[in-house]
C-alpha cells in the first residue's frame, strides 16, 4: 500500500492538520495509519486528519516505569487483559471529558469505525478489572506491523489506566512491537519515556516497521 488517498503528510499545516473528510471507514483508517496519519475528533459531521510536524514516540527499549507506579504494580490491584471488551473500553474513553474543554474525545462516527476496525484485527484494547470483576480502566490503539499507535485511555479507579498501560507494554514486547506512537507528548507519556521527533524521522521509522495486515491475536500473553 504505497499510494494513499490522503495528501502527503508533509503538506499538513503548522497545527498538524492535513485535511478534512465527511466519510470515515476502515479502508481509510488502514491507509492513514500506514502513512503516519490519524483521525482527530472534530465534530459529528467532519473528520480531521492529522500529521503533526513533531511526533511523540516511545520506543519499547526506552520505556520505564516511575517509582511511584512500580509500588502500585506490586499491590496487584487489577487484572489486566487484552481484547476482552473493546467496545466497553472505547465507549468509556468516549465518555471521558476533554481536559481542554467540554465534549467527548471520540465522536459517534469514530466509535462505529473503530469497533469495525477492531473486528478486522487492527484496533486492540487493554482493560484493567478490579477484584470485583468491574472495568476500572483501560486503553486502546491500533497495530500497524511493529508499531502500536496509542489512541485513548480512561480510568474509573485511580491508577487503573496506568497499570493497564504497563501490562500492555509487557504484552507488546512479547508480541514483537518495537515502537509506540503516542502522537503527542503529554506529562503522562513523558513520565514513561516518550519524546518528540520530526515528522520525517517518524516516517522513516514507520516505513521500516509498518505492515497493512491485521493482527487479530497479537496479544495472546494477556489472553483472559
Image (tube, rainbow, N blue to C red):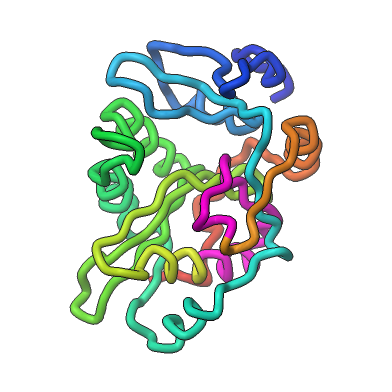
Magenta-colored stretch includes residue 184: yes
Residue closer to the observer: 82 or 39: 39
Q: Residue at x 72, y 32 (%)?
A: 199
The quadrant of the rendering that contains the N terminus is: top right
List x then y, in percent, for residue 57. Answer: 66, 48
Q: Note whether 33 is above or below 143 in the view shown.
A: above
Determine the residue positioned at 55% across, 58% down.
218
The residue depicted at 26 percent of the width and 46 percent of the height is: 96
**Relative height, residue 173 to residue 18 (above, below):** below
- 178 vs 148, left or right, is right
Between residue 124 and residue 64, name the one nearer to us: 64
Tell me which residue sits at (28%, 20%) in the image: 44
101 sits left or right of 184 in the view: left
Residue 153 spot, x, y in % from top left: 39, 52
Q: Is residue 121 visible?
A: no
Q: Position of residue 221 (x, y in %)?
A: 52, 71
Up-down relation of residue 96 to residue 203 (above or below):
below
209 drawn magenta: no
Choose top left, top right, bottom left or bottom right for residue 24.
top left
Q: Quadrant of the C terminus?
A: bottom left
Residue 17 location, quadrant: top right
Magenta part of the chain: 168-190
Quadrant of the image occupied by residue 78:
bottom left
Placement of 154 over or under 80, stated as above or below: above
Q: Position of residue 34 (x, y in %)?
A: 64, 32
Q: Judge from the rendering whether residue 20 lies leftward or rightward of residue 60; answer left or right.
A: left
200 left or right, relative to 127: right
Residue 175 visible at all: yes
Q: How many marks?
A: 0
Residue sitting at the far bottom: 75
Amino acid at each position: 500500500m504505497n499510494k494513499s488517498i490522503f495528501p502527503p503528510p508533509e503538506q499538513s499545516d503548522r497545527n498538524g492538520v492535513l485535511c478534512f473528510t465527511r466519510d470515515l471507514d476502515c479502508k481509510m483508517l488502514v491507509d492513514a495509519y500506514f502513512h503516519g496519519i490519524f483521525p482527530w475528533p472534530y465534530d459529528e459531521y467532519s473528520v480531521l486528519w492529522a500529521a503533526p510536524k513533531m511526533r511523540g514516540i516511545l520506543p519499547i527499549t526506552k520505556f520505564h516505569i516511575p517509582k511511584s507506579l512500580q509500588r502500585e504494580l506490586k499491590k496487584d490491584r487489577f487484572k489486566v487483559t487484552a481484547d476482552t471488551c473493546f467496545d466497553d473500553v472505547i465507549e468509556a474513553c468516549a465518555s471521558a471529558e476533554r481536559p481542554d474543554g467540554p465534549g467527548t474525545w471520540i465522536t459517534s462516527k469514530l466509535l462505529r469505525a473503530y469497533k469495525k476496525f477492531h473486528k478486522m484485527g487492527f484496533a486492540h484494547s487493554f482493560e484493567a478489572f478490579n477484584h470485583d470483576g468491574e472495568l476500572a480502566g483501560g486503553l486502546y490503539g491500533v497495530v500497524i506491523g511493529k508499531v502500536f499507535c496509542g489512541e485513548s485511555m480512561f480510568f474509573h479507579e485511580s491508577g487503573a489506566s496506568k497499570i493497564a498501560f504497563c501490562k500492555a507494554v509487557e504484552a507488546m514486547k512479547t508480541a514483537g512491537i518495537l515502537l509506540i506512537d503516542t502522537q503527542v507528548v503529554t506529562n503522562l507519556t513523558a513520565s514513561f519515556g516518550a519524546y518528540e521527533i520530526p515528522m520525517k524521522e517518524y516516517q522513516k521509522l514507520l516505513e521500516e516497521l509498518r505492515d497493512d495486515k491485521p493482527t487479530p491475536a497479537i496479544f495472546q500473553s494477556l489472553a483472559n
